[in-house]
Image (spheres, rainbow, N blue to C red):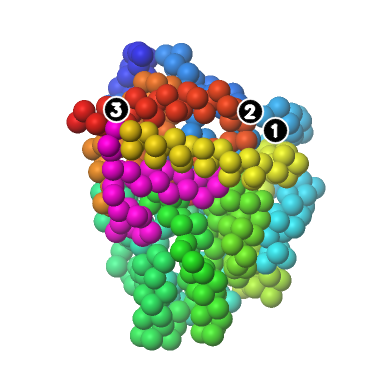
Amino acid sequence: MKFKKSNKLYKKGLVHLVGAVNSPVRAFTSVGGNPLFIKKAKGTKITDVDGNEFIDLVLSYGPMILGHRHKKVQKGVEKALKNGYSFGASTENEIKLAKIVCDAFPGMDKVRFVNSGTEAVISGVRLARAYTGKDKIIKFSGCYHGHQDSLLVAAGSGLATLSMPGSKGVPEGAVKNTLISNYNDLESVKKHFEEHDDIAAVIIEPICGNMGVVIPQGNFLKELKAYLETKGALLIADEVMTGFRSKFGGAQELLGVEADITCLGKVIGGGFPVGAYGARNEIMQEVAPLGGMYQAGTLSGNPIAMAGGIATLTELKKQNPYKKFEETGSILEVILLETAKKYHVDLSVNRFGSMLNPFFTKTNVTNFEEAQTSDTAKFAVFFWEMIKNGVFLPPSQFEAWFLSSALTDNDIKVIANAVDKGMLAISKM
Ligand SMILES: *Cc1c(COP(=O)(O)O)cnc(C)c1O
């Protein structure tokens, strides 16, 4: 497999782009080698500029849940393009997408669209503070909530990949109202409430995907929600990754927990820049122009992005692929575990529906500390074997793999073969 054109573009890209990427998770820092430059994608396949074709398990870090360029989405977006790109005024499609979203999440009477998951969380946190009149926020170690200052601590995702404890440029004042708890550890939440009486909310990835996949154990979420109610604090579900993916109504539908504020991104735009935050009427009442919490956006509710979201979610609802995701996901999980066993490689696989990933460790991974026991050198070897055998993975141990509803039995065979080559290579390390 040749990467001649990618390597050339990488060198060219380094001149005017930072690390030749526009998001550090796309850099190949932790797996070595240079990032691939992509030319196009269709269905389950992604093609680089050298003409190499891969089964895509990155799916743009989640959004492409129907596979790439689904014909209904393509049609919806092309139709919208003919009417103009952006107006700075309301359009009917915003109302349509709002209805689809609010119908999916019972705790949402109203929604506000923004342009990214980061923006959705910035706004969701501001809303929790506006509504409760309190300042402190609890987040969990290893959960990623976008790159705003106040939550860029113990934040998993790209920081974990690059072994960064936090970000430079975040002033102390910006994180002084951020408290950290351990995932799956309610006691570590209660401890903060015993010490502080000004906690507005707890923000959580209800199924975590940003330290690799980590699953809430037992009734963790339900118990957390019940506890917060006794304290008058809100639960913010950051469903940027899990919304419309775990179930149409996200992890909340799957796990039977209703958050006070929900943040969305990724799948909601089907590959176009859409984020959203929403809540019950009494909470959303705080947002301008109804209330005193200000939040705005020149391109928010962009007509092309709305069309992409409407077409994606409409088709997704029709396909209802969640049972298939569960089946395909469990097949992949078994392939990973059995192949690891065959080659005597220590492996622990975490999966929830269509999100999964292997950790190269004997440890059962239920929090960030355990996730970090994974042997990232083994992951790097595995990553390149997967590439060479036709499977595109996120270039990090700490990112989830995603499945699309387009995945075929033949794709699974290609993945199985690549996994075999990957584990074999590790067994020779
Ligand atoms: C991806 C992600 C974000 C950030 O979304 P962007 O669109 O990258 O800004 C926030 N929270 C979670 C849980 C995410 O997975």
User: Could you say which is closer to the camera, residue 127 or residue 25?
Assistant: 25
Q: Residues within 10 Å of mark 3 (few under 14, many from 20)?
A: some
| Quadrant in which residue 303 is drawn | top right
Under tag 2, what secondary structure?
loop
Residue that protrudes farthest toward the right in the picture: 92
Under tag 1, what secondary structure?
helix
Q: Amino acid at mark 2?
A: Arg
Evaluate if marks 2 and 1 touch, with contact meaning CB atoms under 8 Å apart: yes
Q: Amino acid at mark 3?
A: Leu
- On screen, residue 217 versus residue 360, left or right, reads right
Q: Position of residue 318 (x, y in %)?
A: 75, 41
Residue 305 colored in magenta in the image: no
Question: Which circle, 3 or 1, is nearer the viewer?
Answer: 3
Q: Which mark is residue 97?
A: none
| Residue identified by numbered label 2 | 69
Q: Which mark is residue 73?
A: 1
Q: Residues within 10 Å of mark 1 (few under 14, many from 20)?
A: many
